[in-house]
Image (cartoon, rainbow, N blue to C red):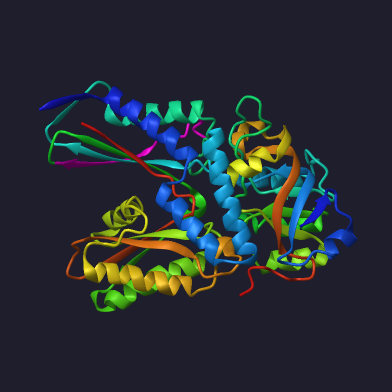
Amino acid sequence: MKRLTLPLAKEQIFALKAGDSVLLSGTVFTARDCAHRRIFELLDADMPLPFELKGAFLYYAGPCPAPIGKATGSCGPTTSARMEPFAPRLLDLGLGGMIGKGEMGEAVRAALVRNGAVYFAAIGGAGAFYGNAVKHSECVAFEDLLSEAVYRFEIENFPLVVAMDAHGGSIYDR
Amino acid sequence: MRTVDTKQIEDCVYRLALRAGRRITEPCRLALEQASRKEAGAAQFALSTLLENARIAEEQQLPVCQDTGMSVVLLEVGQEVCLTGRLLTEAVDEGVRRAYRDGYFRKSICDPLSRANTGDNTPAHVHVDIVRGDHVRVTYLPKGFGSENMSRLFMLTPAQGKAGIIDCIVETVRLAGSRPCPPVIVGVGIGGCFDSCALLAKKALTRELGSAHPRDDVAAIEREALQKINALGIGAQGFGGTVTALAVQCELAPTHIAGLPVAVNIQCHCMRCEEEVLS
């Protein structure tokens, strides 16, 4: 299995094909429904975002609280389709890619190709497994949203499948 | 007449919620193992990761899935039982509140409009059936919403019959695609009215996985729908394959001469359900 460490260079992203398995390490930011709403409010008001979007990877996830001695609680991916209204604009602003689960639509496919970005699928339901692969977690924005806040995660060897690649390929095409 | 203090029900909900959050049911684990032997490639990778995840969760007492769900609590209360103590629903909520705090479970319940989180996973969705006897049966089902979101209700006409019912079930799973965390378990309510039909579908999920309905004509619907679903090719996580659903489970209730309600409640592969009888 291919090992990759974030941030990814464009040539690394272009080398990925839908269906490839990878072990991903590095920094990602969690964001799900409510966090996206807040991020868009900031963008619409021309306000700075709480993290640098360029080259960043979003993890569509909302963790369980961290038990004592752990960086985070269980934290698998949430359904990416709910973030479809948000992903194209964020990709156009430089987002490097996303990690989630399940298919995303044509607007996302086009935005991934347009921007040379990639969408990885984590295995939905494997919350304990992925939680253990988070080595450090820090809330960077919207703390009042609890599990829906934005957390900076340092991840180590996240097993992922390339769901939609930068060439328009998708593992969900049947 | 038997007296049951609702504090006993609170403690029971507490125990069941903690247990449910940390393990999938044994029939579900076995079904995933079986699926894992059948599949190949990315789907096989997904299934083996899920089995490894279930092992880690039980061993380290962690939530199996971060979506520790909306707390669905089905209560069967014997007519010979006299409940004492605080209000039943308050007792259930207190059990949920304590379990989600002590288990480091995610609190996933919010106001539908403001989206403000209630902070303790309450209120639970409590349904009470009054039955014969002097026992209280508590069934705890933490319902994740990746799959709940993919559920549908149909008001068919009687003429649509058995073929119409099967179409509803298969079409719901087809439209859900990779989104609800397949392989799914499909709970189906047939009959009743608009709301009772949906409850039947939810109750169908609590039946032991893989058990056929005792009525032959219903079991036939379950078999045919499962076969058609597994021919869709969606597979585990939508990565393709022959196991898109682990089971189709139907429950029936008499309905009106003018109607044929069908509710399809989708459950992800992370089937967590615990039950205890206080007697």
Residue, far left: B1
Q: Position of residue B59 (x, y in %)?
A: 54, 36
Q: Residue at x 45, y 29 (%)?
A: B99
Q: Position of residue B237 (x, y in %)?
A: 58, 60
Q: Quadrant of the N terminus of chain A?
A: bottom right
Indicate the quadrant where residue B4 lies: top left
B219 left or right, relative to B254: right
Indicate the quadrant where residue A98 lies: bottom right
Indicate the quadrant where residue B216 lies: bottom left
Q: Position of residue B202 (x, y in %)?
A: 35, 52
Residue B62 visible from this viewpoint: no
Q: Position of residue B143 (x, y in %)?
A: 44, 46
B25 left or right, relative to A7: left
Residue B203 visible from this viewpoint: yes
A68 left or right, relative to B136: right
Part of the protein shown in magenta: B117-131
Q: Residue at x 84, y 51 (%)?
A: A55
Q: Would you place residue B126 above or below residue B28 in this image?
A: above
Between A128 and B174, the residue placed more toward the observer is A128
Q: Residue at x 80, y 64 (%)?
A: A16
Between B104 and B37, the residue placed more toward the observer is B37
B200 left or right, relative to B103: left
Instruction: Indicate yes or no whether the magenta region holds residue B13.
Output: no
Q: Would you place residue B81 above or below residue A27 in this image?
A: above
Residue, far top: B85
Q: Quadrant of the C terminus of chain A?
A: bottom right
Between B34 and A79, the residue placed more toward the observer is B34
Q: Residue at x 59, y 69 (%)?
A: B240
